[in-house]
Amino acid sequence: MAHRDGYTAFVSSGVGKRLATTLGLPQPVALRRQVPGRPLVDGPVLVGGHGDTPALEALRHELTAAGATLVGEAPEAGRLGGVIVDLTAVEEPADLESLRATLGPALKRLGRCARVVVVGRDPALATSPGQRAARRALEGITRSVAKELRAGATANLVLVTDGSEAAALGTVEFLLSARSAYVDAQVFRVGAGAGAPPSDDRPLDGKVAVVTGAARGIGAEIARTLARDGATVVCVDVPSAGASLAAVANEIGGTALQVDVTAEDAGNRILRHATTRHGGLDVVVHNAGITRDKLLANTDADRWASVVDVNLGSILRMNEAFLARGGLRQGGHVVLVSSIAGIAGNRGQSNYAASKAGVIGLVDAYASDRGLRRRGITVNAVAPGFIETEMTARIPFATRELGRRLNSLSQGGLPVDVAETIAYFASDAQSAVSGNVVRVCGQSLLGA
C-alpha cells in the first residue's frame, strides 16, 4: 500500500480538499506504485513526434506487446495513461513545434499519475549548432512540463544515439510503469548496445547481487526489490546490525554477511562470499553510508574523515576487488547511491555532500573506463531526495514538511522508489545504459 503522510490524507478528504483548493495549498495524491498484476500503464498512450519518428518505430511493437495501447490521438472519452513524443528527428529549433503540437493538447487529457516520455538524441553528438540547440532544448521543455503536471503525473526525457533506439525499450517501459513513481524531470541516456529483452516478472532471475547497508531503511528495501525481481541477494552490513541484517536476509531468501565496508579486506571478503556461496557476482549496489552533520566551521577532522571514508573511500577500495578480473561477471552492473546533497549541497552537510558528489565522480570515471566497457559492465547512480525513512521522521516538523512539499509531486518518496530505480539499472535490459545519475526526488525544487 502506498504511504500517505498526514497532510496528504487530509487534503484527500472532502473538507481538506476544499480547504486546500481555497487556500491554494499543495494537493498531493497517492502515487501509482508497482503491485503484482498491475498493467504497464493505466490508460491509452498517445504517441507522436517529428518527422519519421524512428524511435517510435523501433519501439512500437514491443511496447504493444508489453501491454501499452498506443493511439495517434486522444480518445473522445476517458483519460490518457501517458504520452510518448519522439523528437529524435529534430534538426533545428523550429522543429520543436511538433512537440508543442503533440503534447500541449494532450496535457489536458492526462489521467491520474500519467506519464510523459520525451525521446530525443544526445546533444553532444549533434553535427550543427542548430541541431545541438534543438536537442538541448528538450531538457528545458521536459523539466518545465514536469512542473506543470498535476495529480501525480511525471515527465522524463530519454536521449538515444544513432542505432540505439531499440535499446531504449527498457527505459521507456520503466518510465511508463508504476516503478518510476517518484522519478520526475530526469534525463536518461541510452548508449550503444542492444540490451536484453525486458522480463516483466523476474528480470534478475539467476543473478547474484550484493547490497551494502542492507540491514534497514533504503538498503533493506533495495534487497527486497532485487529479490522480488529474481536475484539472490547477499545482504551486507556492520556486525552491530547483525540481528536486523539476518532478518532481512531470511525474509528474502538471501544470505547475510557482517562486514564493515571500511575494512581493507571488505571487497575481497564480500566477493569470496558471493563466489563460494552463490557461484559468482553480477550486481553490486553501494548503498552503505553515514551522516555526521555539522556546519563546516564546527566540523573536526574525525567527523569529516569518517563520512568521506564510509561513503566514498570504501567504495573505491571495494571496487578494486569487484571490478578486477575474476570479480564482477561479464555484463555486470554497479549501482551507487549518491544524494541530492551531492548535487545541490545542503547546509551543515559539507562532508556528506562532498562524499556524495564524489560518488557521481566515480560514475563518470568507471562508465568511461574502456576496460569495463569491453566487459559490458554498466555503472550508474541514483540520487535520492526526501525519502520517508526513520532518519527523516526525526527531522523537526517544519523542516520535514518543507522537504516533503518542495517538489513537483508535493510529497516525500518511499524507500521502494529508490529501490525500483536501482533494480532498473541492475537489469540486463539496461546494458546500453551507463554513466547516468538519476535523481529520485519528485523533481525537488532544490538544485538542478
Image (spheres, rainbow, N blue to C red):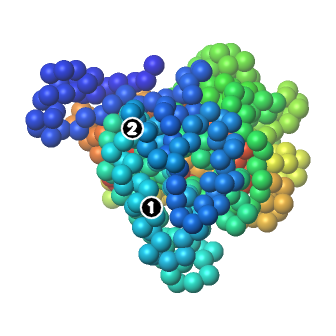
Residue sitting farthest toward the front: 76
Q: On the image, which quarter does residue 235 sit in?
A: top right
Position of residue 69 measured from the top left corner of the image (x, y, whole percent): 57, 37
- Residue at horizontal 84%, vertical 55%? 375
Question: Which residue is more in the foreground, 253 or 163?
Answer: 163
Q: Sequence-wise, which precedes: disc 2 or disc 1?
A: 2
Please give the residue where the numbered disc 1 appears in the rendered image: 99
| Three-letter residue code for mark 1 | Leu
User: Relative to 214, does residue 324 appear above or below in the rendering?
Assistant: below
Please give the residue where the numbered disc 2 appears in the rendered image: 76
User: Relative to 13, does residue 203 appear above or below in the rendering?
Assistant: below
Question: Which residue is more in the foreground, 250 or 439?
Answer: 439
Question: Which residue is more in the foreground, 425 or 236?
Answer: 425
The quadrant of the image that shows the C terminus is bottom left
Position of residue 123 measured from the top left corner of the image (x, y, whole percent): 56, 72
Measured Cα–Cα span from mark 2 to mark 1: 21 Å
| Three-letter residue code for mark 2 | Glu
Position of residue 408 measured from the top left corner of the image (x, y, whole percent): 33, 46
